[in-house]
Amino acid sequence: MPSSINSALASWLAAGGASIGEISITPHGSGWQLRHHADSSADPASLKPLDSPEALRELAKWDAAGNYRPLHSAPNLPSGWIASLPDLASLRLALDFLYPAALANWLRWLDGTASACSLRDTFNRQSGMYRVTGLIRDSEAESLVTSSCHDGNCLRKVLWNLDGTTPWAGFPPDKTSAPSSAPELGQPIPLLCLDLCPILLGAARETVKKRMKSESDAAKAAEAQASPA
Amino acid sequence: MISPKPSSALILVGHGSTLNPDSSQPTHDHADTIRRTGLFSEVHCAFWKEEPSMREVLRMVDSPEVYIVPNFISEGYFTQNVIPREFGLSGRTTDLGHTVAHYTDPVGIHPSMTRLLLKRAAEVAEGIPLTECSLIIVGHGTGLNDNSTKAIKDQVEIIRAMNCGFAEVIDAYMEEPPLIADWATLTSAPNVIVVPFFIADGLHSFQDIPVLLGMESEPTAAASQIEVFRRNPYHLHGRQIYYSSAIGTEPLLAEVMLDQIAAFDTNHKPAA
Ligand code: SF4
């Protein structure tokens, strides 16, 4: 079955598309070579050779210091390697491992079949231990998002806003929008955030729980003061 | 083995973790195995706590039909609440617009799991007569809306009824009786095989259970995790403990996933 994502990827490559996240892609024989932007002018012989999508998945799991990278769009993919992939299918798989769903998010957003889900809509549908995230205050959400999602932590474009209308004041305009140029133009593929991630969801839970605890501590202290033993 | 499904995608859904890098590995490994068979037009993973999310992975699907297989050990909160909600599922089969999704039972409740448990037990205590072995299947216990305790009790009943020769087969749990910490009084054979009924080697199987068994005095550091399984047998209370890695890391689990899809087709697939 022909894949619309693979054919869009092929059109993008044919137009000279070469950049996604921290990676550059160059034609190599009948296949492709991938390396970190930081290694673009390095002697290939000085780079560690990798030859499978699975090897890239393992690489992307750790930062240069050996710490686990639960967020693939964090700007800390290690450099110092060069990956050779024999065909389009293995390139697609490698990109899905390096930047999970990035190609699909971009293409479905471009063709209008996927849209961003606001922070309120995401939090309000939670259950179990994350139900409390629905209680986050607007100001808490604003400072959480600006301190968590900035480019130093995450290269994704934050396309969702607070409630469907209120934008994030703390970001420059290019952090909350993405170029809508078609794959055929070969422009760098933007990493899009259409649904906020589990890390932010977890941080929102901590924010709300911390505030609730300090409110209840303050209430207890006030009560103790009002009725001294 | 199922016949090829060239118009169907497959999504394996795991829990994943933002802290533990081992949590998602078995799900990826089983996806690799199934991808290599070429049975499906595409094979993806999705996670609750890692990327891609369930909402994202649906955008990756290019096929008119997709099977969604929860890589979970039992029915519970995730399989009944979180996964259907995040994928927008309304039942066994849901037309999502660009694809029709079939939602199978979680891998851990398929009857083939018994075969995996017996294989693990035989491997970990290779060469030891079964009549001199007690088999303990260990789970967490007391989970929120979690039927893993029932899944383990069912397996224990099935293995007992098979009369395969074990001195005894029992279930035990980290947080509810019978407690795994009481293994020495719960069992009588000179050799005790312990198989954790978990989907991945997370903190429970690497750290918590070895401490409860008395194999380790304190939780081991992440870097030495794999050593836990390499030092069998452990000599404790005059007995030998053979400790296995989590059942979900067994490579044959990929076959159980395919069995679960075949079971879906037989029992639930709407007529074309
Ligand atoms: S919510 Fe989105 S933009 Fe923010 S850190 Fe997570 S993935 Fe990045």
Image (cartoon, rainbow, N blue to C red):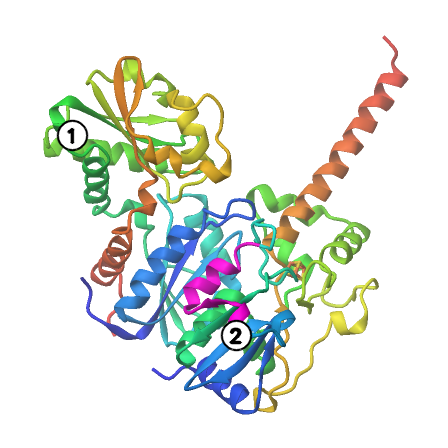
* Residue that label 2 marks: A34
Q: Chain of mark 1?
A: B
Give me the residue at 40% from left, 41% from top. Answer: B201
Quarter of the rendering containing residue A153: bottom right
Q: Which one is closest to the eye, mark 1 or mark 2?
A: 2
Residue B148 in picture, x, y percent from top left: 36, 37
> Does residue A54 appear to the left or right of A174 in the view shown?
left
Which range of residues does the magenta coloring cover? A44-62
For label 1, the residue is B160
Q: Is residue B18 above or below residue A78?
A: above
Q: Quadrant of the N terminus of chain B?
A: bottom left
Who is closer to the viewer here, B263 or B112? B112
> Can I make out residue B196 in this image?
yes
Does A60 sit left or right of B174 as displayed? right
Question: Tag 2, which chain?
Answer: A
Residue B257 vs residue A6, the one in the foreground: A6
Image coordinates of residue B234 in percent, x first then y, are 31, 24
